Amino acid sequence: MYYIIGDIGNTSTRICLINNSKIFKSIIFDTKNIFLKGYIKKIFNRFFKKNLKRKILFSCVVPLALKEIKKALKKTNYKVFEIKSLNLKKLIKINIRNINQLGSDRIVNSIEGKRFRNCLIIDFGTATTFDIVKKGIYEGGVIAPGVKSSIKNLSKSTALLPTFDLKNKQKTYGKNTKDALNAGFIWGYDGLINNIINKITKNWKMNYKIILTGGYANLFKKIIKRKTIVDQNITIKGISKVYREVL
């Protein structure tokens, strides 16, 4: 049987058609497009097929976008659920004060990362997030400014600084504006990311995995001074696990 799951982020949304636990089809689009008339119906029409389960599961950090999707599917036979509406206790223990303050994407990332028992998941999304799983328990995390959003905000806030594509080829300080910006972001995030990793893992007397995901995962893999793995499907894998075991 096939089923539909998705991840609604602040910048982009990904919807996947899953067969058992494997991704059969995947579409990524700007989250803002969800609010365009008729857009989301066209997207889902590309997923609807025979042998498709009627429950659809999302992780979502943009409540209004999820509301729009529910509205679009209201007159269909499909019912939309969000991760936090389910009982996740059998999948992971979450050791923080208020689960409502924890993004659904970070929850499912940790559910998937839990298979390593001890891990640190770094997600290069709209924000750069660090999530800690120790002995199979979610223990909390760190939120830092996102790389791409920081580049855009700097350009919007200044008259003469351009947007640019970040490149990991910075051997010295810049001789022009774009190289100077690239140096600032590469060297700045080098210090930020490696320092946060060191702070988090300083007293860890155990083997742990560092898992990278999100847009800049492959770029910063070359900069991080610890052994890392890149998994661009960790969020979808986590949602799929919740679907199979809870929904």
Image (tube, rainbow, N blue to C red):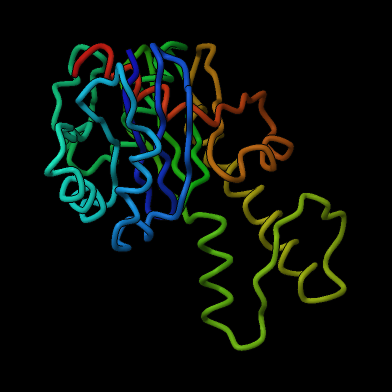
Q: Residue at 31% across / 20% down in the picture?
A: 50
Q: Which of 89 and 21 is in front in this view?
A: 21
Q: Residue at 77% across / 76% down in the picture?
A: 177
Q: Residue at 50% across / 14% down in the picture?
A: 205
Left or right, 147 with respect to 88, comes to right
Q: Which of 157 and 140 is in front in this view?
A: 157
Q: Nearer the viewer, residue 28 or 157?
A: 28
Q: Give the position of the N terminus as an image quadrant.
A: top left
Q: Give the position of the C terminus as an image quadrant.
A: top left
- In x, y percent, where is residue 60? 28, 43
- In x, y percent, where is residue 215? 58, 45
Q: How many marks?
A: 0
- In x, y percent, where is residue 92? 26, 17
Q: Residue furthest front?
A: 50
Q: Residue 51: name its quadrant.
A: top left
In this picture, is 168 found above or below 158? Answer: above
- In x, y percent, where is residue 213? 54, 35
Left or right, 233 with respect to 36, comes to right
Q: Residue at 45% across / 37% down in the picture?
A: 130
